[in-house]
Amino acid sequence: MKNFKYLLIFLWFFFFIYLFFQIIEYIKYKKWLKKIEKNPPPKKILNILKSIKYYKLLPENLKKIINFKIQWFLKEKKFFGIYTDITDEIKTKIAFYACLPTVAYKYFCYPNLNYIFIYPNTIILHKKEIENIISNEEILIEGEATKDAVIIVWDKAKKEIQKCHRNVIIHEFAHEIDYNNGAMDGIPPLEESKIKEFAKTMFKEYEKFKENTIKGRFLGKYHLLDKYATTNKAEFFAVMSEYFFVRPAILKKHFPDIYKELKNFYKIDTYKILGENIFC
C-alpha cells in the first residue's frame, strides 16, 4: 500500500511538471502569434498578394487580418512539391485562397492540417473508396482533402485563379472546414441552434439538383452550377463555397437562401466585394 502511495505521488508530480511545460509552450505560442500579427508580411509575400485582384478588392480591415493569417499559415503548414518546385508564388496564392474562407475567424488556422502536397498536373487514381464502396475505375483528381493533408494540382489551380470560374483551393479547404466538426458531411462547424436550418436550406437544393440531374430533367437555374455538386452533400457544400467566394452573384440571384446561409456562416458579404463581376 505504501509503495502504491509513492507511485501516485510520483505520477502526480510528473503530471504537474508536464502541465507546467504545456502552459509555458502555450504562452510562447500566443506571444509568437501576437508578434506575427503586429508585423506586415515580408515584401516578397506582399508583392505577390498585391498581384491578386481579389486581395486588392478586400477592405483594409480584412487585408490586415488575412496578412496575419497568411503568415501564420505559411509558417505552420509544410508544403511538398511532387515533381514541382515550390515557389513563393505557389505557397502565397494557396495560403491566400485557403485563408480567405476563414478571414472572419481571425484565430482559426486549420488546426488539423499539417501538409499540403502540390502536383503539377491532374492525378490519376486507380482505386478509391467512396462511401464504403470500392471502385477500381480510374479517377482524375485535381485536388483532395484528407483532414491532415490537402492535395492541390497547381496547373488547375493556377488556371482557375486567372479565369475566376471555379477555385479548387477554396473547394478543398471548404472540405477541411467541414472536417473540423469531426466528419465531412456537408455541415460545417455551426452553433447547435443553426444546424437544422442550414441543413434544411442547403440539402433541399442539393436533393432537387441531384434528382433533376439523375432523371435528365430540364435543369433550369441548376444549369449554372457544376454537376459535380451532386456527388454528395460534402461536395455540394464545397462547390457552393467556391461559388460563394468566386461567383457570388449566381448564388445571390438564383439561390438566395444558400447565399444567406453561407454569408451567415463565413461572416463575409462576398457579393458586396465582387458584385456582378468575375475578377478575382
Image (cartoon, helix red, strand yellow):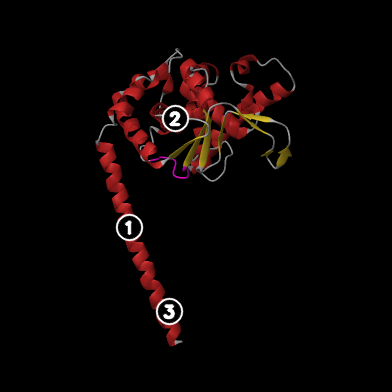
Query: Which-is-in-front pick, marks 3 and 2?
Result: 2
Q: Are marks 3 and 2 in contact (CB under 8 Å)?
A: no
Is residue 44 shown above or below 26?
above
Of marks 1 and 2, the one in the foreground = 2
- Tell me the distance, in whole angstroms, between the alpha carbons under discs 3 and 2: 51 Å
State how far apart marks 1 and 2 are (Cα): 32 Å
Task: In the rendered view, tell whether residue 114 sits above or below residue 52.
Answer: below
Q: Earlier in the sequence, mark 3 or mark 1?
A: 3
Q: Quadrant of residue 275?
A: top left
Disc 2 marks which residue? 94
Q: Amino acid at mark 3?
A: Leu
Q: Which residue is mark 3?
A: 7
Mark 2 packing: few (<14 Cα in 10 Å), some, or many (20+)?
many
Horizontal and vertical percent position of residue 174:
51, 33
Q: Position of residue 33 (x, y in %)?
A: 30, 43
Residue range in magenta is 108-114
The verdict on residue 110 being magenta is yes
Give the structural element (helix, strand or loop) at label 3: helix
* Amino acid identity at mark 1: Ile
Q: Which amino acid lies under the numbered mark 2 shown in the image of this protein?
A: Ile
Which label number is shown at residue 23? 1
